[in-house]
């Protein structure tokens, strides 16, 4: 069997939904930022999934959201020197092409069995009003991954089924047309942290801003949410307090982390120390948000365009090469 070479070490996507909150950072953004520092895994390539937004009922402000989200990620530590960032729709021709070729290798019923799709259909829509694009979502994701000949795709539990489809399609393609596309590997990430809403109702989410620390909000608003946040009675540990502690440890410096640990000990021994904890948390959060907002405000739109243009060139080159090989394997290349 021919040994196929990978082109990209780590491949991952971000959704262009603006207005991140601190739980998005802890549960998702930070994983990508950390990956870029792990040299043993290799250089990451990050794409902004603006085409995936088309599966929403009414995508809006796509371009503005794309710029915003790239600014967010860079302000949060993604370093364009250590990774390549590009915008998915820049590769529309190659993605559409591979989508079409891959679509014949998977059945309608196989697609409908993808658990994430089943869930979405159950939650928001029925088969009668779900778009074909939504059903094709896993194929589109496979195209994104396979065009770049990605070696590792880091994913949480919820996305594993999609990567399995990408692996399945690569194998099926190779079997049908000869060894062409290297099969990507899943890089399993631990269970994501689930941060609760500060107001105690469910998880922190954009949909419920009253319990969320939104990174772009004026800092006083976030501090007042911390003041009102649910904690626990002395001597007790609750999910709400556990989440606040996770947030605290994330934004704290070393001194503050030690202080928090010491406060928790006193709390578990029956001390009345939640006010003191919130004080430390507020100071750390204020510094964290100020730093983020300052960094973000220094990033200009033109700087972001330049970054995604550079990344786009690399991604486009990879995708063009892959499509050429795919067409050759399928005997669709008439002119060499
Ligand atoms: P929405 O309310 O619109 O669903 P959201 O706040 O849930 O928004 P998403 O855009 O759905 O945010 O999720 C983006 C990423 O952030 C996902 O990887 C998700 O797992 C992570 N994430 C979202 N909410 C939390 C949370 N409360 N704790 C930890 N991670 C979270
Ligand atoms: Mg969500």
Image (tube, helix red, strand yellow):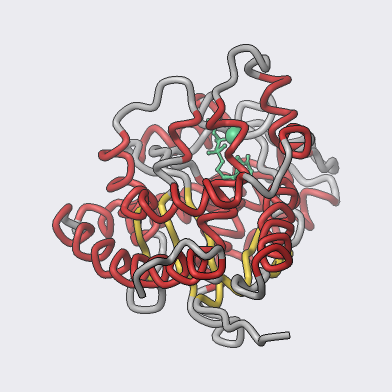
Where is residue 51, by image quadrant? top left
Quarter that holds the N terminus = bottom right
Instruction: Give how far across and how far down residue 213 sits, in percent.
Output: 48, 38
Figure check: 86 above or below 83: above
Left or right placement of residue 72 versus residue 147 in this view:
left
Figure check: 101 above or below 318: above
Instruction: Give how far across and how far down residue 276 sits, in percent.
Output: 60, 47
- Residue farthest front in this picture: 334
Instruction: Give how far across and how far down residue 123 sits, in percent.
Output: 69, 20
Quarter that holds the C terminus = bottom left
**At 47% from the left edge and 69% from the top edge, which residue is drawn?**
322
Q: Nearer the viewer, residue 149 or 11?
A: 149
Left or right placement of residue 48 versus residue 204 in this view:
left
Left or right placement of residue 207 versus residue 309 in this view:
right
**At 50% from the left edge and 54% from the top edge, which residue is drawn?**
98
**At 67% from the left edge and 27% from the top edge, which residue is drawn?**
120
Q: How many marks?
A: 0
Q: Nearer the viewer, residue 204 or 273?
A: 204
Q: Quadrant of ligand 1?
A: top right
**At 40% from the left edge and 78% from the top edge, which residue is drawn?**
82
Q: Nearer the viewer, residue 151 or 306?
A: 151
Instruction: Give how far across and how far down residue 181 sits, in percent.
Output: 60, 70
């Amino acid at each position: 069997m021919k040994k196929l070479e990978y082109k990209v070490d780590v491949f991952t996507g971000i959704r262009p939904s603006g207005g991140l909150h601190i739980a998005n950072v802890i549960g998702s953004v930070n994983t990508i930022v950390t990956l870029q520092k792990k040299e043993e895994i290799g250089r990451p390539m990050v794409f902004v999934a603006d085409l995936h937004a088309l599966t929403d009922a009414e995508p809006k402000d796509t371009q503005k959201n794309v710029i915003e989200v790239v600014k967010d990620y860079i302000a949060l530590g993604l370093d364009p020197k250590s990774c390549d960032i590009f915008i998915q729709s820049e590769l529309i021709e190659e993605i559409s092409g591979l989508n079409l070729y891959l679509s014949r290798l998977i059945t309608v019923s196989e697609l409908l069995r993808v658990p994430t799709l089943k869930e979405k259909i159950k939650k928001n829509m029925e088969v009668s009003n779900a778009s074909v694009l939504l059903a094709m979502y896993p194929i589109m994701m496979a195209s994104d991954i396979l065009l770049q000949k990605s070696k590792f795709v880091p994913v949480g539990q919820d996305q594993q089924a999609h990567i399995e489809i990408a692996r399945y399609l690569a194998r099926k393609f190779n079997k049908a047309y000869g060894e062409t596309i290297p099969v990507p590997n899943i890089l399993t990430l631990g269970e994501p942290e689930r941060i609760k809403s500060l107001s105690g109702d469910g998880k922190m989410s954009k949909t419920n801003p009253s319990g969320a620390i939104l990174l772009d909000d004026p800092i006083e608003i976030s501090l007042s949410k911390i003041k009102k946040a649910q904690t626990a009675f002395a001597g007790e540990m609750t999910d709400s307090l556990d989440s606040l502690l996770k947030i605290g440890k994330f934004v704290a410096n070393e001194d503050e982390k030690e202080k928090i640990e010491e406060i928790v000990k006193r709390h578990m021994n029956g001390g009345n120390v939640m006010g003191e904890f919130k004080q430390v948390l507020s100071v750390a959060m204020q510094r964290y948000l100020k730093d983020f907002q300052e960094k973000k405000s220094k990033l200009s739109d033109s700087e972001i365009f330049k970054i995604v243009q550079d990344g786009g060139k690399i991604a486009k080159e990879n995708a063009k090469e892959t499509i050429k090989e795919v067409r050759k394997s399928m005997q669709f290349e008439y002119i060499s």
